[in-house]
Amino acid sequence: MKKLTKYIAIGMLIVGSSCKKDFLNRYPQDTVSPDLFFKSETDLSLYINGLLDLPGTWQYLGDQSSDNTATTGSIEIKNIMIGTPTSQTITGGWDWSRLRNINYFLDNYSKAAVPQETKDHYAGLARYYRAAFYFGKISRFSDVPWYGKTLQPEDPALYKARDPRALVVDSMMADLSFAVNHIREKVPVGTPNVWAAKMLFARIALYEATFRRYHPELNLQSTADRFLDSAVAQTKDIMASGKFAIYTDQGPTKSYAALFASQDASKISEVILADSYDYAKSNGASNSNINGYVFGDYEQSPSRDLVQTYLMKDGSRFTDIPGYDKFLFTQEFQNRDPRMAQTLVYPGFKRSNDTRPYNQRLNKNFTGYHQLKGYFNTTDNVAAGSMFFPVYRYAEALLIYAEALAEKGNLTQSDLDKSVNLIRARVGMPAIDLVGSNANIDPVLMAQYPDVSGPLKGTILEIRRERRVEFALEGYRYDDLMRWHAGKLLQKIPEGMYFPGLGKYDVTGDGIEDIMLIDKSQDIPADADKVKNSLGINLDYYKAGSFGDDVTVYLKNGAAGGTIVTETNIRTFQEPKYYYRPIPFNQVALNPNLKQIFGWE
């Protein structure tokens, strides 16, 4: 089932009453009295299950805000960079109803006549959810008001100012410390257990540590190390438990892909928490089928920058090959990290029930590359609608562990071998060598992340590459760019495949032409008049020209070729301003104690 049912009683309990301001002065009150409801473990469980909210397969579209994809969607960060944003135009994110529901539980759970261990377990889950809620808030706004209890409509705290980020994060860490010490290991399938809590703890700790380290405007650099220590401690516990392992059961060419195209998370040793779906049992109400959105027919398409990040299969750098920037699609996929062909549609890929390999579809504003991750290659709607999404997986724990130690300067070869190198071994990639990675630093990565320094600089950069590749198109890249102070990378307009000019091209990898690029002045002929290839199959025709021409594909140099162009709007990422968002104007009007920061108006 998609998520645990939010029972009517719980829905009634957590509905807020009407009032003049949509903020924390709406709170659960007289629909169900807490003295009558919070009596048994069943009551506690019902309420907590009503708070369950896991990211699902739509997360595979989450990289639209990053440099991993081009997008035709109305994406906030893109709109900010090409527009003139203010607190009157950027109005999202200032909703507190979920916190009100969490705090209401924490104010009342102790009334239940159950053992203390039971109370602590459910309180731990509520505090886990509160930390996750505030993680979203500090990631967006930095300083925000901390509310540790349910507020009454007349409570003056409703009109308090922002609390400092440091205070809010320390409160989150206290919540997470309680959670990892009290949440049970055995819980209903699809709900967080102690290991999921440790993953959230580690994820937030690494985020905050690196954000503080690379953002001098916060003046919190000196406090970063204790969060790195927390990230290491939580991931060490997960690693030492022996309960999880990098999934390798289907070999180097299929195991990685199986993480994103499987129906039973219990069979995947790597999955710590999954958002599971059962299309048949839910009569279609629960559905993970996003095939029509991830395969290149919707808003996003993978960028050439992502393609060029993958290493060669022997561990050497693709970007060290002379002329790499003019490689054709079929050349780009030769002898690459096997994860590339398990993430992106590759030459020779066949869609379900097709007898011929898929011809890459070219279209205006798209890169030509297609996303495979999150796509279930089947015509069975029940199967496609029953894939799980891995909310936390062991690979992330290993990458957090390695990155945190590297940032502290304490990473050893042994640490690499029991973390990142296990991930690389899954697909047969050579191990990262600590000495070698620092002696031969990738100039491309150096240019992308100029803030990185120290004796382990090269290793930190390679761990960042590894994180980008391992979690490509899973929705984490934007947060990574923000915490690494790498927002300037978003100024680069995503590009697509390279074509040296007009003419015939092979895109299936068999050496036989599949598509034809013609000049914008020509018309695409009728099927009977199209050129056929040596297999007797009509070529797919595309009119090529410069951006804005009446054509089907834009090339950087028009008929003279170049990479596919997806847009031309100039992007400007203002630092530090665009690492944060303004409090919506109407909220500041309601509460003048809320002040804008980092130049927002």
Image (tube, grey):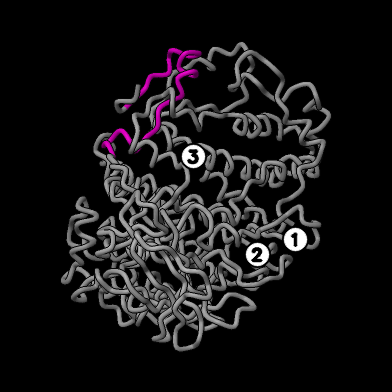
Q: Residue at x 37, y 22 (%)?
A: 596
User: Toward which corner of the image does residue 302 lie, by quadrant?
Assistant: bottom left
**Whole-Å distance between the Cαs marked 2 and 1?**
9 Å
Q: Earlier in the sequence, mark 1 or mark 3?
A: 3
In magenta, the rendered stretch is 573-597
Task: Return the residue at label 1.
Answer: 279
Q: Is residue 585 magenta?
A: yes
* Secondary element type, mark 1: loop
What residue does disc 2 label?
Answer: 387
Determine which residue is flagged by label 3. Answer: 136
Query: Real-space Cα distance between discs 3 and 2?
Result: 26 Å
The residue located at (57%, 73%) in the rendering is 258
- Which of the two labelled residues, at mark 3 and mark 2, occupies the earlier sequence position? 3
Residue 189 lies, with reference to residue 32, above or below; the image says: below
Q: Earlier in the sequence, mark 2 or mark 1?
A: 1
Is 223 contained in the magenta span? no
**Residue 287 relative to residue 522: left or right:** right
Residue 514: x, y in percent? 44, 78
